[in-house]
Amino acid sequence: MTTRHAQQLDHTAACLDPLAALRTPADPRCDVYLTGSVFLDIIFTGLDSAPIRGTESWARGMGSSPGGVANMATALARLGLRTSLAAAFGDDHYGEYCWDALEQGEGIDLSLSRTIPGWHSPVTVSMAYEGERTMVSHGHEAPPSESEPDCPPPARAAIASLTPGRADWIAQAARKGTRVFADVGWDETGRWDPADLADLEHCEAFLPNAEEAMRYTRTDCPLAAAHALAERVRLAVVTLGAEGAYAVDGATGESAQVPAIAVEALDPTGAGDVFVAGFVTGTLAEWPLADRLAFAGLTAALSVQEFGGSLSAPGWSEVAAWWQYVQGCEDQDPAALRRYAFLESLLPAPTRPWPLRRAVPTIGFGRSA
């Protein structure tokens, strides 16, 4: 059995369906649709410091896994959502490995994805040290294909990046009843033009970080930025780093702020993707706004305690193990624990004690019996 397959069994053994009580025969087959670029991530861990020019650095650990949009797709799937990914894969060994890891290892629907002959997979090398990471990437734009869907399939939700000219399907999806959750990348031009957020009128939620939110709204306070964005989108969710997250419901005026969980951060890669996945899960499950924020923050906090992007995305088994463990800690504030009491009726019985040691898959090993 491969280490990746063992990891799959560990995640699925305690997986649950957070939407089980809401499903009907008329529901779309897909819970969440997303598209984007899949990278092969090669992660070096156990570095004492940043590499020094002209020297050779040795890492104490290494792993490899699908990265890029695969981080969010994996996070969604591990939380029990039926996830469909439309992406381009190279026809090299890296592309084959990423396809197999996502489809067979995580149960992600790749029927809308495609393998491109003669195109090599984008690659990122990530070096984690001192709670941060440095990345070097290489890749080329995937050639267009007539098989690419003009509009996503029927789905409860879709996740889109508000990149100008790259999300023509947002309005179409919204008209078909899909709830669109939007994020945004760093504006390298420095313009931070609010016109780039025009598609927010079709979106259910927008989830920028504090710096992005303030720059787009020309405000100097993340909370003020959230309220300004709530005039343009139903749910404005601003992540505040170590201070947690703040959300405003533009339709009802409700707001909520949940502090972050203090953890030892080993690698923040993919934490933002995990936060979005947790918030989408809570929203589709119709949880209260504050519970959604708390769950998203918890899953992100669990992810930064492990190395890698998709490797670190927690499933229900990790959440259950954490909840059992934290309740037995004498130094925990009972009031803080009550913030997560809603988990009690949701979680499966823990199958292993906390902390869990996740299997780290690598492309270097082939299949074995």
Image (tube, rainbow, N blue to C red):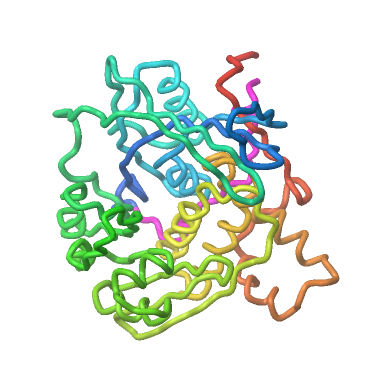
Name above or below for residue 105 compared with residue 321: above
Instruction: State the count of labels.
Output: 0
Q: Is residue 119 left or right of residue 275?
A: left
- The structure residue drawn at horizontal position 33% and vertical position 45%, both measured from the top left corner, is 34
* The quarter of the displayed image where residue 191 is located: bottom left
Residue 75 locus on image (x, y percent)? 49, 47
- Among all residues in the image, which is located at the extreme front? 54
- The structure residue drawn at horizontal position 85% and vertical position 70%, both measured from the top left corner, is 330
Residue 154 locus on image (x, y percent)? 24, 48
Assess whether residue 203 is covered by the magenta stretch: no
Residue 260 locus on image (x, y percent)? 60, 69
Residue 8 visible, this orientation:
no
| Residue closest to the eye, 327 or 121 | 121
Q: Is residue 327 left or right of residue 179?
A: right
Task: Name the quadrant of the C terminus.
Answer: top right
- The structure residue drawn at horizontal position 58% and vertical position 14%, both measured from the top left corner, is 366
Residue 177 visible, this orientation:
yes
Task: Name the quadrant of the N terminus.
Answer: top right
Q: Is residue 286 left or right of residue 298?
A: left
* The quarter of the displayed image where residue 249 is located: bottom left
- Among all residues in the image, which is located at the extreme bottom? 253
| Residue closest to the eye, 195 or 178 | 195
Query: Which stretch did the figure color magenta?
Result: 1-24
- The structure residue drawn at horizontal position 59% and vertical position 15%, both measured from the top left corner, is 367
Residue 93 locus on image (x, y percent)? 44, 16
Name above or below for residue 194 compared with residue 103: below
| Residue closest to the eye, 166 or 59 | 59
Name above or below for residue 303 compared with residue 70: below
- Among all residues in the image, which is located at the extreme right? 330
